Image (cartoon, coloured by chain):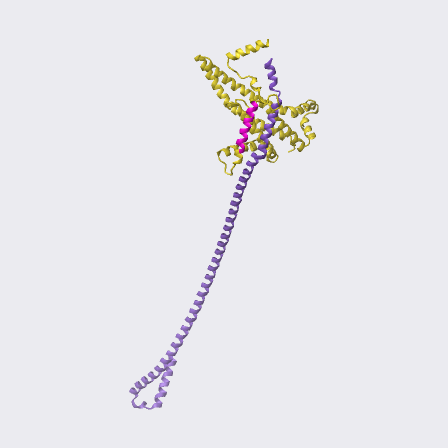
Chain colours: A purple, B yellow
Amino acid sequence: MPQATDGVRLFLPETYDIVWSLVILVVIAVAFYKFILPKFQSVFDERAEKIEGGMAKAQKAQEDADAAKRKYEDQLNNARVDAAKIRDDARDEAGSIIADAHKRADAEATQITTNARRSIASQQQQALVSLKGQVGTLATALAGKILGAKLEDGDVQSTMIDSVIDELEQSK
Amino acid sequence: MSQVGSMTMLLSEASGPSLPTIKDFLPPEILFQGTPFAINRIIFIRIVATIVLLTVMCVTASRVKLIPGRWQSAVEWVLDFVRNGIVYSVLGSERGKRYVPMITTIFMTVFVFNLCGVIPGANMAATATIATPLVFALWTWCQYWIAAAREQGLGHYLKEEMFPKGVPWPMYVIVAPIQLFEIAIVRPFSLTLRLFANMLAGHMLVGTCLAMGQFYIIEMSNKLMTLVGGVWLIAGLVFVCFEIFVAALQAYVFATLSTVYISQSYPQAE
């Protein structure tokens, strides 16, 4: 029965077969353990490192950008506050300038009014004085024409004039 | 009597198709006959496959670049598949790290050796004698016993495996010996036989189809029979494709089961 014994032999490993299987397995395993896989692993690690490095770099760039943004926003805020302050100051200043101008204008106006009043008063005085003289002369002349020589005498003349003026002033 | 039997066999072999027999798996020694280093056809195929595998992998490894080319990407894909798809998915990356080289070695070697079954000229898987799968299975066997002794102690491991929780105690009379038999003997032998039998069956299938095709198309001068031969030939081609698939599948199964056995040596606490 050669077939039957062959069938059994199929499942009974030959010594040399085991030897060669073992030798080959050891050779392959050593190559994989010591050379092939470490070589690939080093490249995998390097690649992972590169990717992680790139990610860290991106992270840092992001942080830098955030910091810069914050800085600019702060500056912008400061600038806004400054501008508001300047505006307020300017407004205050303008107010005080206007107030000053008002005050000065008021003072000037008062001054002008006073001056005007004073000059009116003095002119009135002058007018009164000159009027007094003219009215005297006029009245004298008029009265002389009416009374003739009788009133040529100076004393009488001046007493009369004064009394007329007094009357005028009282009637005013 | 036996002479007559062998004569009839010879006759039938001469006139019919030269179908594959189990003799294909027991080829004569061609070198160093009678020594422990005897080499037959299958061992020769195995040595050539080893040289090819190691040459290709070593050349790829020594030229490995940060930015991979097409070939390197393909190799990396396979290595990544074994590491993440088999080892890490079963053991997790922390425990699995230690076993990545082992499982990668098993997967790559079994796959390449299996593929020899459909490589013209070889036409015989290098894993198609019982010794090679057996040696791989024994490696796994050693690894999971070592892992058990290291991670939880042999006593605890045996207790956990032989007396699984939730089984009523009288059942332990039956369960305990079965479990012991399973972890001591069944696991390595199932690994061995599954791979070996798959390769054996694959060779028989492809060989039968192609031998029948050859016989009907070339050796018979009959038009109708040529048609039958064509069907056999097409079936042969289909089975060649199927064998390529089986080569990968059996490598995957062997690697996955090895990983699972090792993972079962770790304490089941979590």
| Residue B225, quarter of the rendered image | top left
Q: Nearer the viewer, residue B22 or A82?
A: B22
Q: Is residue B10 at least partly visible in the picture?
A: yes
- In magenta, the rendered stretch is B42-58
Q: Nearer the viewer, residue A83 or B237?
A: B237
Residue B239 falls inside the magenta stretch: no
**Horizontal and vertical percent position of residue B260:** 61, 29
Q: Is residue A172 at least partly visible in the picture?
A: no
Position of residue B216 in the picture relative to residue A122 (left or right): right
Provide the major secondary structure of the magenta segment: helix
Quadrant in the picture for the C terminus of chain B: top right
| Residue B144, quarter of the rendered image | top right
Name of the residue lying farthest toward the front: B32
**Horizontal and vertical percent position of residue A115:** 40, 75
Q: Is residue B86 above or below residue A52?
A: above
**Horizontal and vertical percent position of residue B216:** 47, 14
Q: Is residue B105 above or below residue B202?
A: below
| Residue A161, quarter of the rendered image | bottom left
